[in-house]
Image: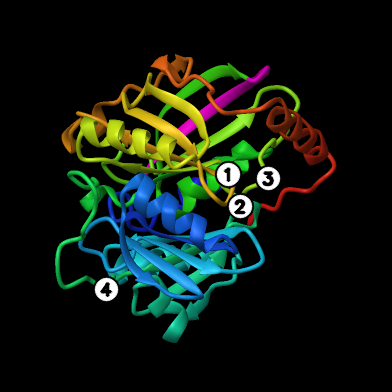
Amino acid sequence: MNAIDVQRTTSSVYGAVRLGYVLVESPRLAEWKRFAGDGIGMALAEDGPSDLAFRTDAHARRLIVRKSALEDLSLGWQVDSPAALDTILARLAAHKVAVEEVGGEEAALRGVERLWRFVGPKKQALELFVEPKLAAGPAAVRGEGFVTGERGLGHVAITTRKPEAMIAFWRQIFDAKVSDFIEDRIGGVDLKFTFLRVNSRHHSIAVAATKGLAMDPFTTKIQHLEMQAATLNDIGEAYRRCRELGFKIAMAVGQHTNDRDVSFYAVSPSGFYFELGWSSESDSEAEAWPVVTHKGISVWGHKPLDQTFGDKLAQMRYGVASLFRTEYSPF
């Protein structure tokens, strides 16, 4: 019996996990306030000298930016029940992954009562929680709002030199299912993307890897964070605002081949991309996605817009440098 079979002997947590919050560590609080609030359209929930908090729905906090000299981030995963949490913690213990239980001010900053923190692939800080704190009134977002609910906050895309180990981690710990694959040549590099879902959202994790020589051209822990807007008009308005505010657009508006999202990618103040997307697909269609390999990430659009030659050169240099670094994997 292999490792995946061993893990599946316990109750599946598929459908009981979703992305709950993202905590960004950054010295650029003023830029984040303009980007997330004025540009993307989230509701500012707290504006202090050491941290910002934004809402997208009933949760008191969905995106938190804490002042720090470093550029880093933590991903908070909401778990439906204590039983599902116990299952995940038991799996981590079986793999000898150290977990720290945290409360007090650290938990309050994230808008939760308690959290369980551990280190995932690429030394990404991952956190689990059960009960989010809810706000008293509706979120004063721009436009019609954001799609969350059972699908969670959105998805993250992660580049890796160890795609097999990365995919195995999410499948063994969260019972992630493969939705589909995409192969494309971007910036002169052949890439393969694996899309993993842990609930009815088409994917909560996208794993990107180069084909052939294993390189990682991105300096940030995640390649991009995505949130889903309620209407197509919200996409156009947010795109217009980001342009007017002077934020770089990494990829202009386009439509993906697999989940059919219409979206654009802006460059966040911390350097990773922020994708805002809209889709007409419903929750009931999630299990119907055929596990196929799409050729190309887009049906139309998503053309590079504000990427300079210097940006491309920096990615190439970092990709080559990654060949000489060891990428951490928890098992």
Q: Secondary structure at mark 4?
A: loop
Which numbered tag is attached to residue 166? 1
Spatial CA span between label 3 and label 4: 32 Å
- Looking at the image, tell me whether mark 3 or mark 2 is earlier in sequence order: 2
- Looking at the image, tell me whether mark 3 or mark 4 is earlier in sequence order: 4
Prevalent SS, magenta region: strand
- Looking at the image, tell me whether mark 1 or mark 4 is earlier in sequence order: 4
Camera sees residue 305: yes
Q: Looking at the picture, which amino acid does disc 1 mark?
A: Met
Q: Secondary structure at mark 3?
A: loop
Q: Looking at the picture, which amino acid does disc 4 mark?
A: Lys
Contact? badges 3 and 4 (CB < 8 Å): no
Query: In the visual, does 161 lie left or right of 110?
Result: right
Q: Which residues are magenta?
A: 187-198
Contact? badges 1 and 3 (CB < 8 Å): no
Q: Quadrant of residue 161?
A: top right
> Would you name the residue on which mark 4 appears?
133
Q: Position of residue 77 (x, y in %)?
A: 39, 60
Q: Secondary structure at mark 2?
A: helix
> Would you name the residue on which mark 2 appears?
121
Q: Looking at the picture, which amino acid does disc 3 mark?
A: Thr
Q: Looking at the picture, which amino acid does disc 2 mark?
A: Pro
Q: Quadrant of residue 137?
A: bottom left
Q: Quadrant of residue 299?
A: top left
Which numbered tag is attached to residue 44? none
Mark in the foreground, 3 or 2: 3
Residue at 46% in and 24% down: 181
Spatial CA span between label 1 and label 3: 17 Å
Q: Is residue 259 above or below residue 326?
A: above
Residue 195: say if magenta.
yes
Contact? badges 1 and 2 (CB < 8 Å): yes
